[in-house]
Amino acid sequence: MTRWSNWAGTATASPLRVHRPRDTDAIAEAISRSAADGRRLRPLGSGHSFTAIAAANSDAMDLTGWTGIASADVAKGLVTVRSGTTLKQLNAELDALGLAMTNLGDIDAQTVAGAISTGTHGTGARLGGIATQIAALELVLADGTVVTCSADERPDLFAAARVGLGALGVISTVTLQCEPSFLLSAQERPEPLEQVLEGFDQFADENDHFEFYWFPYGKNALVKRNNRLPAGSEHRPLSRLKEFVDYEVTENVAFGGLCRLGRAVPKLVQPLGRFASNILSAREYSDTSHRVFVTHRGVRFVESEFAIPREALHDVFSELRAFVPKLENPVAFPVEVRVAAADDIWLSTANGRDSAYIAIHQFVGMPYREYFAGFASIVGEVGGRPHWGKMHDLDAATLRSRYPRFDDFLRVRKEVDPAGIFTNTYLDRVLGTV
């Protein structure tokens, strides 16, 4: 029996068996064996989801031996990558080919299969999440068969599996539509929160990638604007010293120290939050895209994130600002706001609507349930959809009302996994039992 825990410590499991395949045949064999014995099976990913989506109490599949780029058509930008590959490794291998992902989130610890299966996204008003960059998927289904799906081949399975929660099969490879490597200019600076909110729609529309962080109890937001530079532009990365001081010392060591102090003495959280908001620094640089997108997160936290209709952002954020001071326990971590374009993926949080994402966090070990529940109630009024890899308490009945293609997803799930081999307690709650 192997004890498993996710990154934040919010989910644990003790799988009875752990399969470690190194090729597609071995993936199929493990699935067939589990199914024949009437056992459930879950792929583990990297454990970066805050929910129990990867928890396996029967069989688990560890894909760390199934990594790397399997093939690449550099001219077309089509890259097929093995499902256990982390985004960090993928970015490095794409770099070597002169290619890049169009958009990324700010964490690269996830496996590519885990990231797309939970709906991981970055920010950009004209761009979708990582799953929108998929050209094709290869999956191993519950009966051990290996199938390929794309917009032209098994289109319903493709519409479901691009954000499939691991409920349809084990992804063996992902074919991504990449593009030539590019540079991003990065502007990061503190700005008055009221000014950021007033100009939010303009800022989101006029920048390739726009987001901001609000430190509760403070008056400032940390605003990030990332924009593409023309081919041939000069790299102007941060110096190693400034990168170390700004990111490692300030955003990890010092911020982590403030959080630990606030956890030990809760009455200090509010003044510490105001202090953190007031000492935010500005920086400008340009670098290879993934080096701008990705930031090292060394301070552990728990997180809940919902996608809402973009036009509802101002009302929702106003309610959240009014709610935070009423909490019994203070909030030590900032709130993050991002945007994404509508897409057609059935369980994507941006399905059918341009979206704003609000992510709330709390430092590990500090109370969060009142905060998360109140936030869920606020966003629920506008049909908020929870990120599948982040904490929420919604069930299938509620989620069905928020996803127009929810029953289509369940139909495909029933077709490819009629016995529920790939389910677990979390999926039973959010999708219902098979």
Image (cartoon, rainbow, N blue to C red):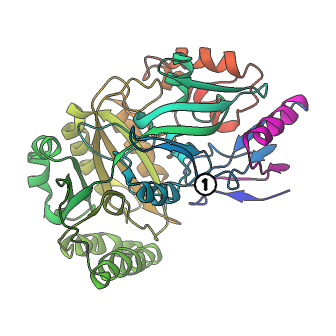
Residue 367 part of the magenta-drawn span: no
Q: Amino acid at mark 1?
A: Gly
Q: Position of residue 307 (x, y in %)?
A: 36, 37
- The residue located at (49%, 17%) in the rendering is 152
Secondary structure beneath label 1: loop
Please state the extent of the stretch shown in magenta in the rendering.
11-36
- 17 inside magenta stretch: yes
Q: Is residue 381 above or below residue 155?
A: below
Regarding residue 392, the answer to whether it shows in the image is: no
Q: Going 17% across and 44% down the picture, which residue do you hit? A: 204
Q: Residue furthest bottom?
A: 241
Q: Nearer the viewer, residue 312 or 343?
A: 343
Q: Is residue 259 left or right of residue 114?
A: left
> In the figure, 175 relative to 184: above or below?
above
Which image quarter holds the C terminus? Answer: top right
Q: Nearer the viewer, residue 336 or 158?
A: 158
Q: Which residue is mark 1?
A: 47
In the picture, which quadrant includes the N terminus? Answer: bottom right
Residue 128 in sight in this render: yes
* Crowding at mark 1 (Cα within 10 Å: few <14, some 14-19, many 20+): many
